[in-house]
Image (spheres, grey):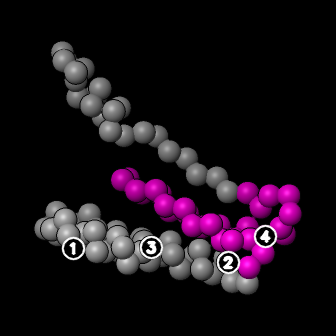
Amino acid sequence: MSGKNSADEMLRYFFSPVAAESAVGKVRDGNEDSGFVSQYSLAVADGMGGHVGGEIASRIAIREFATKLPLITNADIDIDSREDLLLTLL
């Protein structure tokens, strides 16, 4: 990376455009998946189609991730605490 376009090259290296799409599929009547996209994060929760409450579980997982994201990305949080926060989401 050199020259006057180095900042643009760096941005392309570290950031990619994203899109999200979810479909019901051929077997189920409803979609139980949930997703979250922000400037620096992408999360997908598979609703486990056919299991009772799959749509609720995937929605809760994404909500918890979105709620904790400001803490996880806070520059004042040390790496061990950040890892602990991420582990609570698993």
From the viewer's perspective, is residue 67 above or below residue 33?
below
Are dots 2 and 4 in contact, CB under 8 Å?
A: no
Q: Which badge, 2 or 4, comes first in the chain's sequence?
A: 4
Q: Which badge, 1 or 3, comes first in the chain's sequence?
A: 1
Name the chief secondary structure element in magenta. Answer: loop
The residue at the point 78 percent across, 70 percent down is 30
Q: Distance of mark 1 from mark 3, alpha carbons?
A: 15 Å
Q: Which residue is mark 3?
A: 90
Q: Position of residue 9 (x, y in %)?
A: 29, 26
Q: Quadrant of residue 54?
A: bottom right
Choose mark 3 or mark 4, whichever is in front.
3
Q: Distance of mark 2 from mark 4, alpha carbons?
A: 10 Å
Q: Which residue is mark 4?
A: 30
In the shown orientation, is residue 55 left or right of residue 8? right
Q: Nearer the viewer, residue 74 or 45?
A: 45
Q: Which residue is mark 2?
A: 54
Q: Which residue is mark 1?
A: 81
Choose mark 2 or mark 4, whichever is in front.
2
Residue 55 seen in the current view? yes
Report the span colored magenta.
23-51
Q: Distance of mark 1 from mark 4, alpha carbons?
A: 38 Å
Task: Work out which residue is located at the far top of the displayed protein and give it.
Answer: 3
Q: Which amino acid is tagged 3?
A: Leu
**Image quarter hosting the N terminus:** top left
Q: Which amino acid is tagged 2?
A: Gly
Residue 67 seen in the current view? no
Q: Secondary structure at mark 4?
A: loop
Q: Secondary structure at mark 1?
A: helix
From the viewer's perspective, is residue 8 above or below residue 17?
above
Circle 2 packing at 10 Å, graded few (<14), some (14-19), many (20+), is some
Q: Inspect the magenta stretch and tell me whether residue 48 lies in it.
A: yes
Q: Distance of mark 3 from mark 2, alpha carbons?
A: 16 Å
